[in-house]
Image (tube, coloured by chain):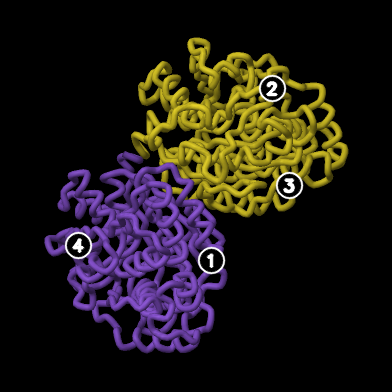
Chain colours: A yellow, B purple
Amino acid sequence: MRFVLAAGTTRTATIEGISAAGATPELMADTPAIDAEILVYGQPVSSDLVPVSPTGCPTPAVISRAVRERVGFDVTVIDAGLAAETDAPTVSVGAQPGRDIREEHAVPRADAVFHRARKFGRSLPDDELFVAETIPGGTTTAAAVLRALGADLGVSSSLPENPLALKEQVVTTALDASGIERGELVDSPLAAIEAVGDPVQATVAGLTVGALESGSSVTLAGGTQLVATAALVRAFGCGEPLSLATTHFVAADPAVDLDAATAALELDVTVTDPGFEHSEHVAMERYVAGEAKEGVGMGGALALADRAAVGMGAIRGQIASVYDRLDPDSTPESEPPVTGGDR
Amino acid sequence: MRFVLAAGTTRTATIEGISAAGATPELMADTPAIDAEILVYGQPVSSDLVPVSPTGCPTPAVISRAVRERVGFDVTVIDAGLAAETDAPTVSVGAQPGRDIREEHAVPRADAVFHRARKFGRSLPDDELFVAETIPGGTTTAAAVLRALGADLGVSSSLPENPLALKEQVVTTALDASGIERGELVDSPLAAIEAVGDPVQATVAGLTVGALESGSSVTLAGGTQLVATAALVRAFGCGEPLSLATTHFVAADPAVDLDAATAALELDVTVTDPGFEHSEHVAMERYVAGEAKEGVGMGGALALADRAAVGMGAIRGQIASVYDRLDPDSTPESEPPVTGGDR
C-alpha cells in the first residue's frame, strides 16, 4: 500500500470567504507545501508555520501524520501545482498553480498533467494506492467541475458554515467565463478541468485512471473534492471498482449526500469517525465544531488505522502528541517515530 | 533514522573509461534517476531500464533496496543535479548537473546548493541521518577535491581495474584548468567543489554540516566519494563526530586506505561484508569480481541490517528477490514489500 498525496493550489482559494485552509488567504498558498512536510517528516521543515484555520483549527495533516506514526505506511507526494517551495520530496507531473476559476482557463495544460500522472499511476508497482489531496479552495473547484459534468452532487466545506451561496455564485461566474452550460462537458472531463477545475483534479484523476488500468486498487482518501475526481474518473470511461474513504465530519455535512455519490459513481465508501468528541484537546475540538472536516487523506488514514486494528483512542493520543510537537509553546519532543512502512 | 540519497550527475562520467555506473557513457546520465526509483519503489518506474555496468553488474541500488525491504527505513531523495527526469519524489536544493571537471567551473553556484542543503539538514527533525550518494564519475571528482584540499587519500572505482592513471590525468587537467595548485584550497571547500567537484558533494556536505549543527548524528553511507565529502565537512570547520559506513569491497580495494582516512578526518568507520561469495546469483557475482563495490548507500544499508540483527544470508536472499523482480526474463513477482519505516 502506498499513500499518495497530491498537493497543489488554485487562486480560487483567495476569494474572500471561500476556504478556511489557512489563517489568511495569503497563507493558504503555503498550506499544501507544509502539509506535505508534516506528513513526511512529522513537522514543518521549510518554515515554522503550522497551517491553521482563522480560528486555530490545525491542518488535517496532523491527523494523517498521527495515524502514520501508529500504523506506518509509505508516503509519496506529487507536486500537483504547489505555489510555495516545499522541503518535502515531490514527484513532478508538470503541474502549475491553478488560476481563479472565474478566469477563462483555470488549468492550462490540464491534459499534459493528466497524462503524466496517468503514466506514473500505471507504472507504480504497488497493489494498492490511497490517493489524497491538499488544495485550499478545492471544494469550490469540485463544485464547478461537478456542474460542468452535469453531476448533481453537493460539496462540503472547511468552514463550519458552508458558504454555499458564495460558491454557487463563483461557480456560475466560472462557467460563464468559460462559456460552458451545466452538464455540457459530461463527456469531456479534461475540458472541464481545464476550464473550471484545479491541477490537483488533473493529477488525481490521471493517477487514479493509470493505477486502475494497471490493475492496482485505488481508494480516494478524501471528501467531496475526491467525489468530484471520481466523477472525472468515470467521465474518462474508467469503470473499474473504486473506493472512497472519508470522515464522519464530511458524511454528517448536510450539504453532502454520500449515498447519492455512491450510487451515481459506483463508489465503495468507507466513513470513519475518530471520536474527537471524547477529547478536549485543541487539535481536535475545532473538528467537533465543524471545521476542516477532511483533507490530506484524513479519512483514508483513519480507515487504515481501523484496518490495522489501532483504536481511535490511541489515534487521538497520537494526534495530541503530534500537535504538541508542532506547537511552539509546548515542551519539545524527540524525533517523530514512524512504526512501519508498506504492509 | 532517515536514509537520505543525494542523486546527481557530472559530465566527468562521460570520459571514456572513468566509470562503470552504466552500460554506456550515455546511459550513465540516467543511472541516478533510476537508482532513486529502485530505492523508493523497488523497481524503475519512469522506464524499464535497470542500471548495469558494461559487464552486467546491477546497480547497488538493488542491494540497498533489498535491505530496506527486510529492515524498513524511511528514504528521502535529494535532486543533487539529476540530468534525467525521475519519478522518485525528490527534494530540491537548486542543484544542476555538474560539468566535466576539466572545464574551468565544474559546479556553478556550489555555494547556493551547499547553503540550501545545509538549511535542509538543519531543519530535519530526525535524530540520525544516513547520507548516501549516486553519481557516476564520483570517485574522479572525489580525487580532484581531495587534491585541491591537499588530502593525500586514494579513491576507489566502480571498475574492477581502477583506472588510476586516467583519473590522475583528468584530475591534473582539472586542477590546471581551474588554475589550482594541490592543497591550495585547504581552507576553501566551496571553491574546491566549484572548481573541480560535483553537485552531490555540495549537497551532501551541506546536508551533513547542517544536520551536525542541529545536533543530529550523521553516518556517511558510502566509500571514497564520501571520504572526500568528509574532508569537505572538516574543511568547513565542522568538528562534530562523524561516521562512515561502507562495504568490504571498498575496504579491500588496494587504492583505498580507510585507516588513513579515519585518522586524518576523525571518522568512525564501519565496514560490512555481505558475504556475496556465498552466492552464485548474477546480482552478486560481479561484486565478488570487484565491480561496483559501493554506491546508493550500500555499505550503510548493510550496516543497518547488521544493527537490526538481520543476517547477511537473509539479505542475500532478498537481493536475489529484488533482482529477479527487475529482470525482464524472470518470473513476475508481486508488490515489493517494505517491512518498516523509521525505527
Q: Position of residue B212 (x, y in %)?
A: 39, 52
Look at mark 2 in the image and give the residue it sits on: A159
Camera-nearest label, 1 or 2: 1
Verify CB contact (< 8 Å) between mark 3 and mark 2.
no
Query: What crowding class fits label 1: few (fewer than 14 Cα within 10 Å), some (14-19), or many (20 or more)?
Result: some
**Element type where label 2 sits in the image:** loop
Tell me if label 1 and label 2 are in contact, CB under 8 Å. Answer: no
Judging by the rendered image, the residue that carries numbered circle 3 is: A107
Query: Residue at point 72% right, 33% down?
Result: A24
> Sequence order check: which comes first, mark 3 or mark 2?
3
Closest to the observer: A65 or A4?
Answer: A65
Protein chain holding label 1: B
Badge 2: chain ID: A
Disc 2 to disc 4, C-alpha distance: 59 Å
Q: Are marks 2 and 4 in contact (CB under 8 Å)?
A: no
Name which residue type carries label 2. Answer: Leu
Which class describes the residues within 10 Å of circle 3: few (<14), some (14-19), or many (20+)?
A: many
The label nearer to you, 1 versus 3, is: 1
Cβ–Cβ under 8 Å for marks 4 and 1: no
Label 4 environment density (alpha carbons within 10 Å; few <14, some 14–19, many ≥20): some
| Marks 4 and 1, the one that precedes in the sequence | 1
Residue B281 — which label?
A: 4
- Give me the chain letter of mark 3: A
Are the residues flagged by discs 3 and 2 from a single subunit? yes
Residue A66: x, y in percent?
45, 29
User: Can you identify the residue that label 1 sits on?
Assistant: B111
Q: Residue at x 37, y 22 (%)?
A: A310
Q: Amino acid at mark 3?
A: Val
Q: Residues within 10 Å of mark 2 (few under 14, many from 20)?
A: many
